[in-house]
Image: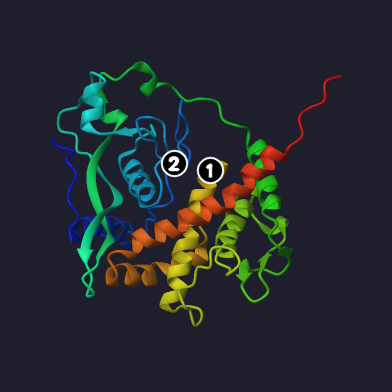
Amino acid sequence: MTTKPTTTNPDVYSRVTARIVADLEKGVRSWLKPWHAEHAAGAINRPLRANGTPYKGVNVLMLWSEASERGYISPIWMTYKQAEELGAHIKKGEHGALVVYADSITRTETDPKGEEVERQIPFMKGYTVFNVEQIDGLPAHYYAQPAPRLEPLQRIEAAEAFFAATGADIHHGGNRAFYAPGLDRIQMPPFETFKDAESYCATLAHELTHWTSHSSRLNRDFSSKGYGDEGYAREELVAEMGAAFLCADLGITPETRADHAAYIASWLNVLKNDKRFIFSAASYAQKAADYLLAFKDKSEQAEPEPVAA
């Protein structure tokens, strides 16, 4: 059993992509995690490292998928070495989950003019982590029981305050939810037409992820010529994952939209043709979520302090 990082090679990309593709082929979206499982560290939102830092990007998808498949309640993951340092050990017969990290090295080279130049060479490595439920002998707080959550109404109110803080131009009417890039406007069906408030919030989170693609924001462009082409499929994949990341941070259950089931074939086509796109898509989704959540942080900081009587 080892957690020694794997040097960069196509296998890391292939292994991660193969996991996501396998889920999609079964009709399972890896970004729809076990939303109702809870732990003292909080409801399972983002998977957490041993030190409590949330994972980001493609590692979120990988660990959500692993937790969902194996039924883990705890959101906390650690390496074999980290468990060992805490005086714990991996249970016999347990197999870990693959996560990755990206970095770069600086190499000095000689250019055609004979001058030395520095070049950044990106690389990616994979290593293995285990859920704390696979580990015996950890300190008690790693196995702590579920903690109280905010009431549903409180979570919805917090989400609505966040949506308002983005300043996005949101119109209501009709029976479709979409983002119109030319008008830079989000169109949503009336609130009353959704089955519940969480469905409304989850749908709006998806459209807000599209909203971040505008040239005045993150300037994300896959050169889509229209509905159903590859560029369109790529943007929809980013929006699906971005919405899932947002929902996790807002404590909202994501809506499994029936109209998006039709995209699975096109997503599979994109991922099978480009083994690295799931990494790019998760990175774009993470950037969109971070961009939007910055509005939440600003709105919370701007809240006036209560005045003493």
Task: Pinpoint residue 152: horizontal percent, then vertical percent.
Answer: 63, 37
Q: Amino acid at mark 1?
A: Asp
Q: How crowded is the residue under tag 1: few (<14 C-alpha within 10 Å), some, or many (20+)?
A: some
Kindly give the residue lying farthest to the right in the view shown. Answer: 309
Q: Please tell me in which quadrant of the rendered image residue 150 appears.
A: top right
| Left or right: 281 in relation to 152 | left
Q: Is residue 251 above or below residue 258?
A: above
* Residue 115 in sight: yes
Q: Amino acid at mark 2?
A: Arg
The residue identified by callout 1 is: 249
* Residue 157 in sight: no
Label 1 or label 2, whichever comes before in sequence order: 2
In the rendered structure, are the residues bearing label 1 and label 2 in contact, judged by CB atoms less than 8 Å apart? yes
| Left or right: 185 in relation to 98 | right
The residue identified by callout 2 is: 46
Which residue is drawn at the image coordinates 37% and 56% (left, top)? 28
Q: CA distance from mark 1 to mark 2?
A: 7 Å
Q: How crowded is the residue under tag 2: few (<14 C-alpha within 10 Å), some, or many (20+)?
A: many
| Left or right: 240 in relation to 122 | right
| Left or right: 117 in relation to 201 | left
Which residue is drawn at the image coordinates 21% and 31% (left, top)? 80
Task: Pinpoint residue 73: horizontal percent, then vertical percent.
Answer: 39, 33
